[in-house]
């Protein structure tokens, strides 16, 4: 275990990516 923040940071990053994808789909549709 290098750092306990890495997993939570990744989860937050995937959440941001999901929101970006939803925003792009919303703009296209």
Image (cartoon, helix red, strand yellow):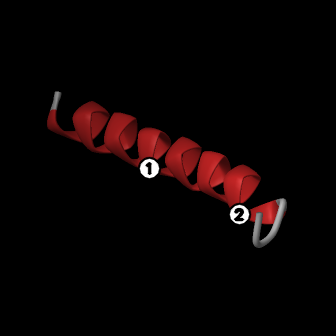
Of 6 and 16, the residue lying toward us: 6
Looking at marks 2 and 1 on the same chain, the residue that comes earlier in the sequence is marked by 2
Q: How many marks?
A: 2
Q: Position of residue 13 (x, y in %)?
A: 57, 55
Extreme-right residue of the structure:
4
Q: Is residue 26 left or right of residue 8?
A: left
Q: Residue furthest top?
A: 29
Mark nearest the camera among 2 and 1 is: 2
Side (left or right) of 3 relative to 29: right
- Disc 1 is placed on an element classified as helix
Quadrant of the rendered image containing residue 25: top left
Q: CA distance from mark 2 to mark 1?
A: 16 Å
Q: Is residue 28 left or right of residue 24?
A: left
Q: Which mark is residue 8?
A: none
Residue under circle 1? Answer: 17
Locate residue 29: give its quadrant: top left
Q: Given contact means CB atoms under 8 Å apart, are the residues at marks 2 and 1 in contact?
A: no
Residue at 48%, 41% (x, y): give it. Answer: 19
In percent of width and height, residue 16 lies at 54, 50
Which of 18 and 6 lies nearest the eye of the viewer? 6
Across and down, in percent, residue 14 comes to: 51, 47
Residue count near mark 1 (Cα–Cα under 10 Å), binned few <14, some 14–19, many ≥20: few
Query: Foreground residue, 27 or 15?
Result: 15
- Mark 2 closeness class: few <14, some 14–19, many ≥20 residues within 10 Å: few
What residue sits 77% from the left and 63% below the top?
Answer: 1
Residue for point 44% across, 39% down: 18
Task: Say what secondary structure mark 2 lies in.
Answer: helix
Q: Check the image and name the residue furthest to the bottom.
A: 2
- Residue 21 spot, x, y in % from top left: 33, 42
What mark, if any, has residue 6 been given in the picture?
A: 2
Question: In percent of the image, x 71 and y 63: which residue is there?
Answer: 6
The single residue placed furthest to the left in the displayed view is: 28
């Amino acid at each position: 275990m290098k750092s306990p923040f890495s997993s939570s940071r990744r989860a937050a990053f995937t959440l941001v990516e999901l929101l970006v994808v939803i925003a792009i789909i919303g703009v296209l549709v």
